[in-house]
Amino acid sequence: MEATQPGFQDLLTDALRYWEPRRIVYNAALFLVVVGRFVSEWPASAAAITFDGFVSLFILGVLANVAYCAAYVVDLGVQHSTLREAWRPRRKYLLLVGVLFGCALAYFISRGLSTPSAAS
């Protein structure tokens, strides 16, 4: 007897249950990178403490979370294939690559935010 493919609602629920709790890890990693850059460049980075600086960080935080949603595209695509059961325990690798990529972007972008020339 052939197993039936779960419906889209079931696959989406599975993806949400996997990815949403891990969003906290992703955001914490990006936060640590940005704070680390800010602290490492103190006191020069103090010039970035402005309303515009906070708005920039907010916008970048929202964009980082939109980028996190790219994992859903990959996850749901693979879950719709015959590789679903083999994929599910390997999603952690997509998370790792996404966190590392996000941290690299946060590092380079925050470098520009924490310098006095970027705050003017």
Image: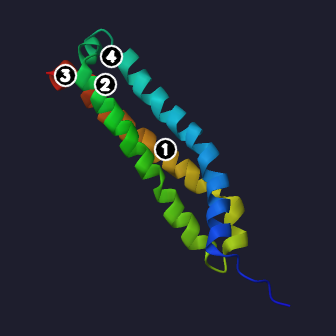
Please report the residue visible at 49 percent of the width from the left and 65 percent of the height from the top.
73
Q: Identify the residue under disc 2.
A: 54
Mark 1 in CB contact with mark 4 (< 8 angstroms): no
- Residue at the disc numbered 4: 41
Three-letter residue code for mark 2: Phe
For residue 116, the mark is none
Side (left or right) of 94 relative to 61:
right
Q: Earlier in the sequence, mark 3 or mark 4?
A: 4
Viewer-side residue, 115 vs 47? 47
Q: For residue 57, what is the image quadrant?
A: top left
Mark-to-mark CA distance, 2 and 1: 24 Å
Q: Residue at x 51, y 44 (%)?
A: 99
Distance from Cα at disc 3 to Cα at disc 4? 14 Å
- Observer-nearest residue: 18 or 88? 18
The x, y position of residue 9, in whole percent, is 63, 69
Which residue position holds label 3? 119
Q: Quadrant of the C terminus?
A: top left
What residue is pinned by disc 1?
Answer: 100
Who is closer to the viewer here, 104 or 75? 75
